[in-house]
Amino acid sequence: MSMKEDNFADWYLDIVEKANLCDKRYPIKGMNVWTPYGWKIMRQIDSYIREEFDATGHDEVCFPLMIPEDQFAKEKDHIKGFDEEVYWVTHAGLNELDVRLVVRPTSETAMYPMFSLWVRSHQDLPLKTYQIVNTFRYETKQTRPFIRVREIHFFESHTCHVSEEDAQCQVEEDIEILERIARKICLPYTLLIRTEWDKFPGAHYTVGIDTSMPNGRTLQMGSIHHYRTNFSIPYDITYEDENGEHKHVHQTTFGMSERLVGALIGVHGDDQGLVMPPGIAPFQCVIIPIFKKDNAAAVAEATMRIAEVLRSAGIRVKLDDRDMRPGAKYYEWEMKGVPLRIELGGRDIENGVVSFARRDTGEKGEIAIDSLAPGVQLLLDAISENMYQKACEIQKSRIQDVDSVENLPEDKILRFGWCGCEECGHKFEDTYGFKILGRPYHPEQYSGKCIICGKPVDQPAYAAHTM
RNA sequence: GGGCCUGUGGGCUAGCUUGGUAUACUUGUGGCUUUGGGAGCCAUUGACCCCGGUUCAAAUCCGGGCAGGCCCA
């Protein structure tokens, strides 16, 4: 039994520590320091997210961190949902503030009063914006790096549309973007419409994006919300249509966070450490020179040359020329999850090759120096594909159909019948300790009976223990 | 929300029951040496979470705080 499956909690913290992804010693619970390697990973993910959202017509913005209390409280469900987990600024200098300030837990209430100024005509729509900022939530539960923190590195897109249908199209576009991001990070996911009691406060509906972790629990990596006019009414976001009528906009949001980092650690890592998906690895390939006393200069020169060849082919390369034994470097870069290691020594130079080792499979081999860049690219693509397939298989194997409440498997995602009523839902959750993740966003082939009341249903529900 | 456990150099850790000079390994730094899977030798820096209490004396006992970890709802 591997450490990863056997004791996920210790394994996870060990990897975070040894790969040096963050420093947990900052003296505020749930607020960790992003150290260089961890931040490089986050930045790679952010860059790709930016690329995707820019390419689909979204504009990046950046709103203030603080929100006046009265502005925050306009949407009643929203304030109720966040009441117990926001940070308050109550003083400034020596004065107590007349209007307290909320430190944003998410930015709807910061943005929407401004949106009401920005949007006047149907020509201003759709309004598609996003920002990547830190948000704050006063978590009272146990915190864990990247997975449950109080200061959250957060992506959020916010859009306004002329109609519910238009907003619905935006949800569809978000799902396409999500698919590309998930491929890049090699993470499988499920899209489930959350229960009424678990949806985002103020939303018309919420689609949860979950992935499965090695301890059998699910981790929500993000969510997509359709707000209808639930926010545009209290925040008065209206436009004038072609006929001169004033109407409320329909809104959506898409949120993702640093949990993507937590997910990729958990899904891809092994007992040797992190395994980074090539798509977002800060270093896709590390080059390690193998010196001998008499060939040091020639080897150093050759490694610099191949590093340059790979770099100019657009590959993110680290040349590790530190004065250490090669074995020590292998262990270190394996821990950090670099997808491909390239070794170059006297023997390789003579043969006109470089030696490589794959992080995902451990496979070793050689690449002819003449076709270095295409050879490396081919390997990176193969690693990415292999990681994705492997993760998908594992995720699939964790979903289990159940048709009775007898002997529910504790470490599986349950697929079962639920009539959809709150009474049966709460009864199921409270009695068996699973959380209902929701019902599929994309309808599935299904016919069964509600596991509680026995009413026939044509769509399944999913439930699991969550991180 | 409820319960349990823990806090000692950068990391990991001994010592705590029974109060009295703080242990090992690792890392860091300087040097010599070495490089196809964690090399070796020498020298050296570096710690009892915070506040209060008990005591001649507290890492050790007591109370509170902060921080970390686990389990249950």
Image (tube, coloured by chain):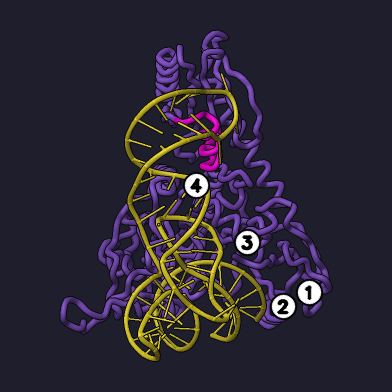
Q: Residues within 10 Å of mark 2 (few under 14, many from 20)?
A: some
> Viewer-proximal residue, B24 or A195?
B24
Q: CA distance from mark 2 to mark 1?
A: 8 Å
Looking at numbered disc 4 in the image, what kind of residue is underneath it? Ala
* Comes first in the chain, label 3 or label 2: 3
Q: Over which residues does the magenta segment extend?
A: A324-340
Type of residue at label 1?
Answer: Ile
Pointer 2 residue = A428
Bin the neighbour count of mark 1 within 10 Å (Cα to Cα): few under 14, some 14-19, many 20 and up: many
Q: Chain of mark 3?
A: A
SS type, badge 1: loop
Among the two numbered marks 1 and 4 on one chain, the one whose residue lies closer to the N terminus: 4
Q: Nearer the viewer, mark 1 or mark 4?
A: 4
At 44% from the left edge and 48% from the top edge, which residue is drawn?
Answer: A38
Which mark, residue A19? 4
Q: Amino acid at mark 2?
A: Phe
